[in-house]
Amino acid sequence: MRNFIPAIALLGATTGMALADTDTTIETTTAFFQALEQGDLDAVAALMADDVVNTLPYAASGATTPDAFRIYSGKAEVIAYFEGASQFIPTVSFIDAKVTVSGDGETVFVENRGDMILADGRPYSNLYVWRLDFEDGQIVEMTEYFNPVTAAIAFNRPIGPEQTSN
């Protein structure tokens, strides 16, 4: 992953968390994004708990209620989501990453830019914010925020309230 330099802000640093825990969290986070870039979904799966949940809360409809969210539950569903995305976006690069790790080392926020090439050869760029929650060194929950309007335009999807699928 190009330019993946953790800019760490430890929140609640008085928790007494060992620095090694923070290092492990950063290493796992870095490995996650590198595996996504390389299309290595086996490596992505190895970093996640079996009951991992991936939530995409923004919809092109503009709806902000949980019933409009796309939610993938369990490792198989999450990997199927990434596998499906890779069919439309075969070339992925995450650049300009800014990483914030919580004081207990169990939550990471990553802001990065996706610099990608779509299957039809068109460039696609979007700004992402990811929340990754960890337990026992594995990702147990992730939330993927991105601009849904940018994505809808790139994938020729309708935008606005009349849009019913996420």
Image: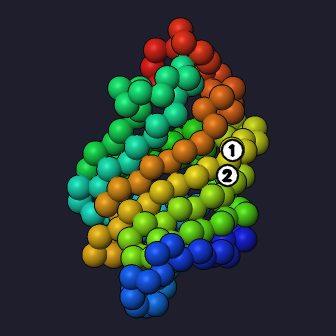
Q: x%, y% of residue 33?
A: 54, 64
Q: Residue furthest top?
A: 162
Q: Secondary structure at mark 2?
A: strand
Q: Is residue 27 above or below residue 109?
A: below
Q: x%, y% of residue 140?
A: 31, 60
User: Residue under circle 1?
Assistant: 126
Q: Give the amino acid at mark 2.
A: Gly
Classify residue 34 as left or right of residue 74.
right
Q: Give the amino acid at mark 1.
A: Asn
* Rendered image: mark on residue 165: none
Q: How is the image coloured?
A: rainbow
Residue at screen point 72% across, 45% down? 125
User: Residue under circle 2?
Assistant: 114
Q: x%, y% of residue 152?
A: 63, 27
Classify residue 141 as left or right of residue 7.
left
Q: Quadrant of residue 94?
A: bottom right
Q: Are marks 1 and 2 in contact (CB under 8 Å)?
A: yes
- Give the position of the N terminus as an image quadrant: bottom right
